[in-house]
Amino acid sequence: MNLCYLDGRYLPLDEARVSPMDRGFLFGDGAYEVVPVYSRRPFRLAEHLGRLARTLAAMRLPNPHSDEEWADRVTTLVAGNPWEDQSIYLQVTRGADAVRNHAFPKDVRPTVFMLSEPLLTPAPELLASGVAAVSAADFRWLRCDLKSVSLLANCLLRQYGFDQGCAETVLFRDGFLTEGSASNIFVVRDGRLLAPPKSHLMLAGITYDVVLELAAAHGLPLEVREILDAEVRSADELWMTSSTKEVLAITRLDGRPVGSGAPGPLGRQMYAWYQEFKNTVMRSG
Ligand code: PDD
């Protein structure tokens, strides 16, 4: 049985119901997070809750819970589900009004939904081969820094890659790399790690931050700056990062090999640092 959380109650997922008047359903008016849980311990929960709070503040939606209340709910949900490693989805929408009106309703209680799914990080064979990606123009809006449930553009872009048998779609806006449809993208050139700077054009990934911290801690040459389309296409290595994919090499882009066409040394090193860091954090505290 898959236990979920909806508005104060823990219940089987197939019994959970929300109103069709919910603004998440009608307008995509909501925020979300995906928190990885390893051996029943959430990874970087405080950072995920911080980003949720920033998204909610930008949406002018009061956070329905304190961080302690969120953490308690995550703990209960994790304990109520069978998997050691879980992916916890948190969603807050502006709630259900009596009428359909774009402007915000008054005195409406937000809808809080939490879902647990087994966390399936990339299998060893995928880590060994890397994945294929395609590129596309980033036609999303100008607040890609918000983790909003309005994901139609991301879904269309992801499906564009999926239709071509690819694991990700790498996005460019005005000739510069932004991110993937559901991940951040890193570039390796001449032994240096390049990362696009945080801005309104991309989501500041929690995994992105961990990768930057690990690069700094291990003295990997690092440049956080705008990255040209041509620099991506002639990269030695490309990686995608996210809470569920961790650090995964992209070894083909638009049908052409990236670098040697196999996961490169820096990517393998970063993957190892990431696993080591995860294990250290999970063992402590
Ligand atoms: N997506 N950029 C986009 C557009 C994303 O959707 C995600 C994650 C990331 C990486 O963020 P993080 O490292 O915090 O997971 C970057 C999640 C996993 C999802 O939508 O399922």
Image (spheres, rainbow, N blue to C red):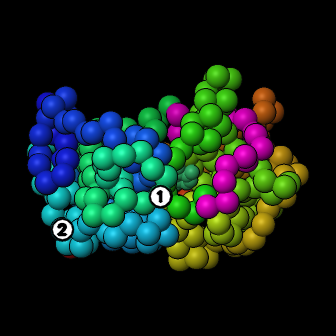
Decide if residue 20 is on the left or right side of residue 54.
left
Horizontal and vertical percent position of residue 144: 61, 58
Viewport quadrant of the C terminus? bottom left
Residue in the image at 19% along x and 36% along y: 16
The span picked out in magenta is 126-143
The reply to whether callout 2 and callout 1 are in contact (CB within 8 Å) is no
Q: Nearer the viewer, mark 2 or mark 1?
A: 1
| Residue 267 visible, this angle | no
Residue at screen point 53% across, 61% down: 146
Q: Is residue 113 above or below residue 262?
A: below
- Is residue 135 magenta-colored? yes
Q: Which residue is mark 2?
A: 69
Q: Quadrant of residue 130?
A: top right
Residue placed furthest toward the right: 230
Q: Position of residue 132 (x, y in %)?
A: 66, 33
Disc 2, SS: helix
Residue wearing tag 1: 103
Tell me the amino acid under the disc marked 2.
Answer: Glu
Is residue 151 in view from this perspective? yes
Question: Which badge, 2 or 1, is on the more N-terminal residue?
Answer: 2
Q: Quadrant of the N terminus?
A: top left
Position of residue 210 measured from the top left corner of the image (x, y, whole percent):
49, 67
Q: Is residue 133 above or below residue 75?
A: above
Name the residue nearer the viewer: 13 or 48.
Answer: 13
